[in-house]
Amino acid sequence: MNKRQLLTAALAALLILFSQSLTAQEAAEEGPKYGWQNELLGGLNFTQTSFSNPLQGGEDSWNWQLNINGKFVDDQEKFNWANTANITYGRTKVGDDDDKKSSDEIRLESVFTYKMGVYVNPYVSATAQTQFTAGYNFATDPKTEISNIFDPAYFTESVGLGYEPFKNFKTRLGAALKQTIADEFAAAYSDDVETLDEIETLRSEVGVESVTDFSDKISENIVYTTKLSMFSNVKGVNEIDVRWDNLVSAQVSKYLAVSFTMKLFYDRDISLKREIQQVLAAGLTYSFL
């Protein structure tokens, strides 16, 4: 081998080593990023209708709703600790009637998952749910207070296995404890109807909890998110508590968004009928984190 061939071979070897070094560096840079990932998004929706000499009838009205959604996730090689907070509050007024609460919820969730290197991993979780202000039954005259902050409140603790086959879908199933606490309105929320001589302010249930989350980006600016939570005290199919949240949000511009929310609730201990809430809103949105 002459000097030219030797030099050519040496340059080729250097190029191969250099390219392999760049490939390894890019792979390292594209590897998993561990640590805290935080999101805090706030939205304010407001609608107002005003009439002057309404010949065909009509009443002045206004409605506003504040939404704050936070997600704080510590993702490490061996575990994932996900914390979420959802806060909603709104009021509405029609005509000369007093303003009324249109939405009111505080919902917190914490899930700790130990990574075993497979799709199915063990977890422990805790959730809490209550409201900010008093709720009233306006069908009575005068109106009757029927709920307040921590009256009632719901807490659920669960341990089991979680399954996450891909990024936007995850589900978990485990043994669970559920507590319903109340005070002034214990008869409607936490009382055991089988004990006639006492009104319990705490109802504890042992059962099974299932929670499924899914999100999908329908288009560049439209996202669909759904969350189905079920709790069964294993007494029967009709004893399953259900909460199903659905949200379709469209980001019109940096600070303007349109959303449609549909929530379904069913808890036989409170009512034999299911409850559905629907909200179509447009308003301001801002990302704090």
Image (tube, rainbow, N blue to C red):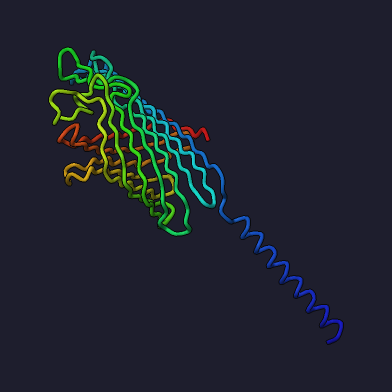
Left/right of residue 2 with respect to residue 169 in the rendered view = right
Q: Residue at x 21, y 43 (%)?
A: 240
Q: Quadrant of residue 165?
A: bottom left
- Residue 9 locus on image (x, y percent): 78, 79
- Residue 3 locus on image (x, y percent): 87, 82
Quadrant (top left/top right/bottom left/bottom right) for the N terminus: bottom right
- Residue 205 locus on image (x, y percent): 25, 38
Left/right of residue 79 with respect to residue 270 in the rendered view = right
Q: Residue at x 17, y 23 (%)?
A: 198
Of 141 and 208, the residue lying toward us: 208
Q: Is residue 239 above or below residue 138?
A: below
Q: Quadrant of residue 27?
A: bottom right
Of 47 and 88, the residue lying toward us: 88
Left/right of residue 58 with respect to residue 105 in the rendered view = left
Q: Is residue 42 above or below residue 160?
A: above
Of 66 and 148, the residue lying toward us: 148
Of 166 and 1, the residue lying toward us: 166
- Residue 19 locus on image (x, y percent): 69, 67
The extreme bottom residue here reads: 1
Q: Residue at x 42, y 34 (%)?
A: 85
Q: Is residue 223 above or below residue 120?
A: above
Q: Residue at x 23, y 13 (%)?
A: 96
